[in-house]
Image (tube, rainbow, N blue to C red):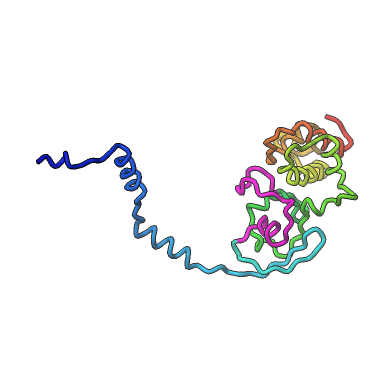
């Protein structure tokens, strides 16, 4: 008897069998050892003191905790957003010791004793920071997800120009940069707005600066 005639596999059965065999991946010994070592590694705690929006916090943290996760998960300051988590979108921008920084790219233990300002510390609903008020006036946001980082960066941009810090758009590296739309766009380029409110954001910054492009 023809043994092949005894096989009564339908096309559906054959496809099922192929799918099962494709997913049956056997991990390599090296991969298994790496996974076991990673799973066995316990967290290493460290004590960190941070002054956030004028309030001092004493924290004990896993040394692998990012500054962004400390703000959001430990201090419940959720105004600072987690966007790309790779330092490319700017949604997590805060002020650290007077300078803006992407909080997703740095570990909290690196900043023991630092002073931090988040969007919650710039103003209050009853007394907005001038930049917050300008964003509302010029409709500098749509969905609003990037807005906290945009505002923190905008405040820093005006400080940078005031202090004479040049950018790639500056005509000279030795003279004080002029406030212009080009300067603002270059300095704000690390903050992405997927809604496309860029022109309104520039208007808001120029309004606070009291100048025009």
Q: Quadrant for residue 170, please give it.
A: top right
Left or right, 157 with reference to 46: right
Number of disc labels: 0
Q: Is residue 35 above or below residue 140?
A: below
Check if residue 68 falls in the magenta segment: yes
Quadrant (top left/top right/bottom left/bottom right) for the C terminus:
top right
- Up the image or down, 213 lies above or below 3; here it is above
Position above or below: 40 against 81: below
User: Front-most of 70 and 108?
Assistant: 70
Query: Is there any visible trace of residue 171 in the rendered image?
Result: no
Residue 195 vs 32, above or below: the answer is above
- Residue extent of the magenta highlight: 65-92
Look at 66% across and 61% down and name the residue there.
Answer: 108
Q: Nearer the viewer, residue 142 or 89?
A: 142
Q: Is residue 32 visible?
A: yes
Task: Give the dominant element type of the magenta stretch: helix, strand or loop.
Answer: loop
In x, y percent, where is residue 25? 35, 51
**Front one among 17 and 24:** 17
* Residue positioned 34% across, 51% down in the render: 24
Q: Picture coordinates of residue 36 (x, y %)?
A: 43, 64
Q: Residue 184: image x %, image y %?
A: 76, 36
Tell me what residue is drawn at x 64 percent, y 52 percent: 104
Residue drawn at x 36%, y 56% as measured from the top left: 27
Residue 86 drawn in magenta: yes
Residue 163 occupies which quadrant of the picture? top right
Q: Residue 63 location, x and y as percent?
A: 60, 64
Q: Is residue 74 left or right of residue 29?
A: right
Quadrant housing the N terminus: top left
Outermost left residue:
1
């Amino acid at each position: 008897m023809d043994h092949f005639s005894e096989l009564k596999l339908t096309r559906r059965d054959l496809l099922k069998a192929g799918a099962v065999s494709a997913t049956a991946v056997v991990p390599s010994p090296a991969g298994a050892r790496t996974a076991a070592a990673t799973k066995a590694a316990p967290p290493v705690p460290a004590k960190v003191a941070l002054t956030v929006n004028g309030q001092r916090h004493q924290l004990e943290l896993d040394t692998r905790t990012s500054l962004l996760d400390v703000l959001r998960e430990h201090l419940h300051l959720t105004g600072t957003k987690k966007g790309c988590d790779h330092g490319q979108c700017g949604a997590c921008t805060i002020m650290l010791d007077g300078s803006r920084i992407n909080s997703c790219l740095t570990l909290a233990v690196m900043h023991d004793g630092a002073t931090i300002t988040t969007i919650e510390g710039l103003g209050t609903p009853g007394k907005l920071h001038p930049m917050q008020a300008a964003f509302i006036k010029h409709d500098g946001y749509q969905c609003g997800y990037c807005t906290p980082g945009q505002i923190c960066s905008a405040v820093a941009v005006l400080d940078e120009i005031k202090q004479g810090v040049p950018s790639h758009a500056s005509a000279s590296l030795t003279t004080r940069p002029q406030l212009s739309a080009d300067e603002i766009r270059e300095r704000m380029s690390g903050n992405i707005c997927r809604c496309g409110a860029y022109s309104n954001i520039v208007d808001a910054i120029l309004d606070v600066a009291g100048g025009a492009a």
